[in-house]
Amino acid sequence: MIELVNIRKIYRMGSVEITVLTDIDLTVQPGEFMAVMGPSGSGKSTLMNILGCLDRPTSGDYCLESRNISTLSDDELAAVRNAKIGFVFQTFNLLPRFSALKNVEVPLIYGGVPARKRRERAVPLLERVGLGARLEHKPTELSGGQQQRVAIARALVNNPPLLLADEPTGNLDSRSGEEILNILTELNRQGVTIIIVTHDPNVAAQCKRVIQLKDGRILNDQVIT
Amino acid sequence: MNFLETFRVAFEAILSNKVRSGLTMLGVIIGVMAVILLVSIGEGARTYITKELTGLGTNLLIITPGKTSTSGGFHPPSAGTVRKLTYDDSLALRRRAWLLTDAVPIVFGTGKIKYKNRGRDTSIIGATAEFSRVRNLFVDIGAFMSQGDVDAKAKVVVLGRRVKDELFGEESALGKVVRLADARYRVVGVMRKKGTSLGWDIDDVVFIPVTSGQELFDTDGLFEILASTPRAEDVDRAILQIKNILIRRHAHKEDFTIQTQGAILETMTTILGVLTAVLGGIAGISLLVGGIGIMNIMLVSVRERTREIGIRKALGARNRDIMAQFIVEAITLSGAGGVIGIFTGVGLALAIPLFVTVLPTRVSAWSIIMAFTFSVAVGVFFGVYPARKAALQDPIQALRYE
């Protein structure tokens, strides 16, 4: 489903070139549950941005569902993000002015789904993450765990085949983090491909595959059985 | 993202910060209001002048002694004597200029009119019977002077309404004898109340036969000759005819000037049109300033919502979706400001004449349409830069923005 071939990412800061990723070759099969680990500055976030179609590699090819992403325009990338990828962020990144329901509807708006249908799809998802009673609550009226569950509902609303989670439990207490991980595990069981970036070995322990990054290279690729 | 959705998002953003949105709109409101108000005042003045001038009689030709040119430029004083316009000139015109319905000789001066122990300094106009018709000024009580009065140099006077009221009060003036510069005149009529026109009180005047007037002011010349044509199309030909007749009588010299009411009207409306445009333009500048206010606030808003932009982009918003969102927000601000500005502007324009009676206003549709279009255009123009800035944000940077 995901195929990274010889991915390299170089940032230019003035005359200095910083190589963030080199020689990344990675294949992810549909239905995988993978953790990306590594110390700060190892290139985790950059890899995540490239996988999430927020950034383009300097060289190399990225194929998502047999489509080469590296050559797409900004608008085409936006469409891919909208339809194929769900994001879960460490800081939740909900729109503060909107209710939980409206937040979940945002990807549908950009997907061109009419208003009535949006509600039909957003409400069951919020119920599924246990927030059926808090549809009209603003993010500030929700706990961290609840906010992250809204974010997961939002990530799933367009039925994307791939879910990217960047430290999804990093800002949560251990109990909420546990709940979030349970939701993700359950989703994976239902067939969603999930990639989690994390520092936390406990989180990685729940995954079926763990990749270790260091200095922009894949140090270790390990399948947990 | 469809338009309705974009509009809703913009509206919610505006409502989420009411005070700031209100203050931003205020700039546009004041601008639009100023445009409509000032243009209404300008238009009102123009309508007023046009009405007053046509009220004085249409198709009017005014012949004055001496040659002046309306085409501008410097003219050296002509050699030779300037012949006065005479009563005989007016008679000649009346006899031979068949395109004219009337040719009224006029003398003009000021003097003291006295009745018993009451006196008043007033304007004295010497004219003929046709004056009443040519200038649309009519007698209320009694009669205007007759041709017989003119021929006989009769000492008769027709009083303007104000003069009558000042000298006689409630008392009837008809048949009474008044003193006009030490000569005794019999009152034969009182004019209908007309009011002030272009700063001249038409009621504060008395009329006497032109011949008596010449005697009173000790002159054999005329102040002017008023002529009129039955139709506006005849004016140009009538001018030629007058010139022909008078030049022959004046030793083949054109030592007089013919002005037409139409030309005067045209000059006035042109001047007032320019004035209106200038006023509108000045008001337009305030609208422009309002637009800069919008741009300023939009830039702040884009910065504040950097993270929101990042989130929206991550969730699939294209650059043009973001751009549309911010432009629509700017247009909504300026458009709403425009609508409110129109209502306050029109309201004030309609209210002003109620309090300041000398300031007529006229709300014209074009000023409303122009002000609104301009305010929306201001929104587009000053919204584009902030919106572009928003749209071109790098989603990764934007998501990291604190």
Image: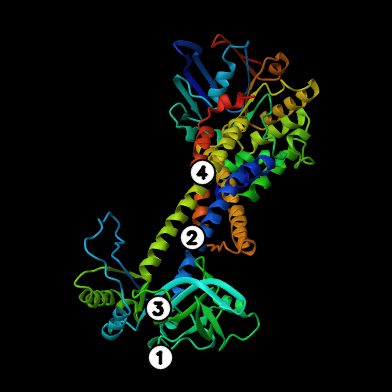
Badge 4 marks a residue whose secondary structure is: helix
- The single residue placed furthest to the left in the displayed view is B252
Point out residue B105 in the picture as x, y percentages from the top left corner: 36, 78
Which residue lies at the image location 77% right of the left edge and 36% below the top edge? A130
Which residue lies at the image location 52% right of the left edge and 63% below the top edge? B44
Using a 10 Å C-alpha cutoff, classify the residue at mark 3 as few (fewer than 14 neighbours), some (14 to 19) or many (20 or more): few
Q: Let me know if residue B284 appears in the view.
A: yes
Mark earlier in primary sequence (4, 1): 1
* Residue carrying label 4: B288
* Contact (Cβ within 8 Å) of mark 3 with mark 4: no
From the viewer's perspective, is residue B160 above or below residue B335?
A: below
* Residue carrying label 2: B366
Using a 10 Å C-alpha cutoff, classify the residue at mark 4 as few (fewer than 14 neighbours), some (14 to 19) or many (20 or more): many
Mark earlier in primary sequence (2, 3): 3
Of badges 2 and 3, nearer the viewer stands 3
Of badges 3 and 1, nearer the viewer stands 3
* Contact (Cβ within 8 Å) of mark 2 with mark 3: no
In three-dimensional space, the C-alpha distance between marks 4 and 2, rounded to whole angstroms, equals 19 Å
| Chain for numbered disc 2 | B
Mark earlier in primary sequence (3, 4): 3
* Contact (Cβ within 8 Å) of mark 4 with mark 1: no
Q: Nearest the camera: B33 or B357? A: B357
Q: Is residue B96 left or right of residue A52?
A: left
In three-dimensional space, the C-alpha distance between marks 3 and 1, rounded to whole angstroms, equals 17 Å
In three-dimensional space, the C-alpha distance between marks 2 and 3, rounded to whole angstroms, equals 55 Å
Mark earlier in primary sequence (4, 2): 4
* Residue carrying label 1: B148
In three-dimensional space, the C-alpha distance between marks 3 and 4, rounded to whole angstroms, equals 63 Å
Using a 10 Å C-alpha cutoff, classify the residue at mark 1 as few (fewer than 14 neighbours), some (14 to 19) or many (20 or more): few
| Chain for numbered disc 1 | B
Badge 1 marks a residue whose secondary structure is: helix
